[in-house]
Amino acid sequence: MKKMFIVFLIIITVLVLVVVAYLQLPLFGANPTGERLAKIQTSPHYKNGQFHNLSDTPTWTGDTSIIKGLYRFLFEKDKNVAPKSPIPSIKTDLNTLPKNKDYFVWLGHSSYLLHLNQKTYLIDPVLVSATPLPFGGKPFKGADIYMPNDMPKVDYLIITHDHYDHLDYDTIKAMKDRIGQVIIGLGNGAHFERWGFSPTQLIELDWYQDITLGDLHITALPARHSSGRALKQNQTLWASFMLQAGNKTIYIGGDSGYDVFFKDIAKQFPNIDVAIMENGQYDKDWANIHFLPNDFIQAVKDLNPKKLLAVHNSKFILAKHAWDEPMKLLSQSAEQENLPLFTPKIGEVFYLDDNPDFEKWWERVE
């Protein structure tokens, strides 16, 4: 028994050392320190060593715990959690699109390219993997058509928060020399500085802070979510953003659960041209931090945009609902509620001044 106990201790020690060593890899980024941490500590949204939502926001809802939630995720997934055939998509050459038009190109999940007033924006690019592990996190067939080398040079990279399905180290590393300025919530600059970005490239904003960069005016706004790439959570700020460029006002939603601040955003910005919002990868177990379908509709009604685009779906398995449920339910609600929903396929160019009649592409997938 003594020998078995010693062997057990050796195995546990080795496993702990392996985990500790693995967590030192660059992909995990870095926690804020020094002047960056001192600035964070002055934020009204930071207390007791971490950022907090405007409303009390337990990650797990009801009687759910992390153990129950993990069990349900592993063993209670819908049988159609992944598509049996490829996701419809179009491989557009992003380097040849017109410079004098405003457009949106969805890259799958929450990644997309915006072109506004002759400037290019890349939002939450995850083009390699949505997990820090060497396995899993791979995209569905058809949703995997874009890689970092397909991306054009971008004037602004916008990251809503540092979770792996919104901030992919391999994508950022591959694109580093094609990125101009990086717009992020407080604290996220620590990741980018570790990855070789210059401090002068980084613009870190607290909620309700804004900045003018040439013809771009951008405001960081609340989201109801969380952050973290390693063991220590909520050291960096998650956010939504309002872009005002040229004659357009664009809302970038980021991950969020519902809260009353959507009404406040609408009062501050009563003429939103396009709202790009997260629809999918939800669950009643974490309804506080991801829209359930009805909450999504309420947030859209609060914001009252002229055009609506739905992302955060149809690329990865991150929840246990059927892969096409988010778009099916949203499409039905949009027709019932007369919402201005547009549904381009991955890679399909949406020129923002047009009103195309996109197909219900998810209906063509087995």
Image (spheres, rainbow, N blue to C red):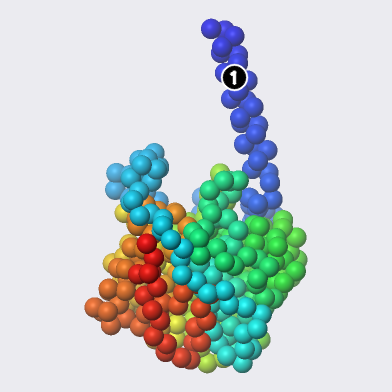
**Quarter of image, res 54:** bottom left
Task: Pick whichever, 299 or 92, lies toward us.
Answer: 92
Name the residue located 44 percent from the left edge and 63 percent from the top edge. 314
- Figure quadrant of the C terminus: bottom left
Q: Which of 121 and 90 is in front in this view?
A: 90
- The crowd level at tag 1 (other Cα within 10 Å; few <14, some 14-19, many 20+) is few
Residue at image coords 75%, 66%: 198
Pick whichever, 355 or 57, lies toward us.
355
Q: Where in the figure is residue 122, as x and y percent of width and height?
A: 60, 73
Q: Quadrant of residue 215?
A: bottom right
Q: Can residue 1 be seen in this view?
A: yes
Q: What residue type is labelled 1?
A: Leu
Side of 132 where 284 appears, left or right: left
Q: Residue furthest top?
A: 1
**Residue at figure coordinates x 59%, y 67% from the top left:** 146
Q: At which x and y percent is residue 235?
A: 56, 54
Residue underneath mark 1: 9
144 sits left or right of 197 in the view: left
Query: Residue visible at 57% across and 7% down?
Result: 2
Residue 257 visible at all: no
**In this rendering, position of residue 289 left or right of residue 347:** left
Q: In this orientation, which residue lies closer to the viewer: 211 or 215?
A: 215
What is the x, y in percent for residue 307? 40, 83
* Left or right: 273 in relation to 25: left
